[in-house]
Image (cartoon, helix red, strand yellow):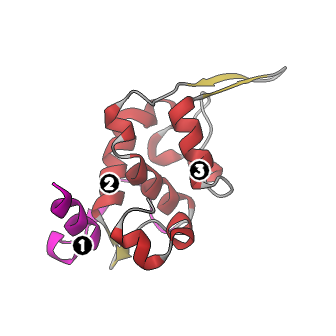
Amino acid sequence: MAGSAVAQEAGADDWEQKPYIIKDGKVDYGVYNGFRRYHSTCHVCHGPDGLGSTYAPALTESLKTMSYSDFLEVVVNGRQVVNASTDSVMPAFAEVPDVMFYIDHLYAYLKARSNGDLGRGRPKRIPADEDPVFKEWKASQ
């Protein structure tokens, strides 16, 4: 997060509130990749597009008040909620590379959905040559 050039330009606090670029209805590489990762790992419990299910909460609502560090804590270590009306378990994903390598992308996708800046379904991407997030990723390879 704070290590990325895009985050440093905008400031880490700004990144936490808006960790994405949406231009002409198209999203940056991180959001698009976050969409893909979410729908390969998270949607089974949290529902399509982060809208929740009878099994797990709507992440589009949770991220309205949850900080990036709290999000990271829950994804890395999991969470168990047991009370009179609820018995739910979020597994820990600390050892799952397809989640942890792309945790910022997952957060960016879910934050865009939570902020109401991104609708449901597969987003269209900003062309690679115009996308600073993709350029940064490509340079790191």
Look at the image and tell me in which quarter the C terminus lies: bottom left
Of discs 3 and 1, which sits in the foreground? 3
Find residue 61 and report its horizontal and vertical position in percent: 64, 52
The residue that mark 2 highlights is 122
**Left/right of residue 131 with respect to residue 96 in the rendered view:** left
Neighbour class for label 3 at 10 Å: few (<14), some, many (≥20)?
Answer: few
The one nearer the camera, 121 or 64, is: 64
Secondary structure state at the residue bearing disc 2? loop
The one nearer the camera, 13 or 50, is: 13
Secondary structure state at the residue bearing disc 3? helix
The residue that mark 1 highlights is 131
Question: Magenta residues, as a range?
Answer: 117-141
Instruction: Give the vertical position of 24 relative to 64 (above or below).
Output: below
Of discs 1 and 2, which sits in the foreground? 1
Dot placed on the residue nearer the N-terminal end, 3 or 1? 3
| Residue type at numbered disc 2 | Arg
Neighbour class for label 2 at 10 Å: few (<14), some, many (≥20)?
Answer: few
Query: Whole-Å distance between the Cαs marked 3 and 2?
Result: 26 Å
Find residue 11 and report its horizontal and vertical position in percent: 50, 75
* Labelled pair 3, 2 in contact (Cβ < 8 Å): no
**Left/right of residue 129 with respect to residue 26 in the rendered view:** left
Find residue 39 and report its horizontal and vertical position in percent: 37, 40
The residue that mark 3 highlights is 69
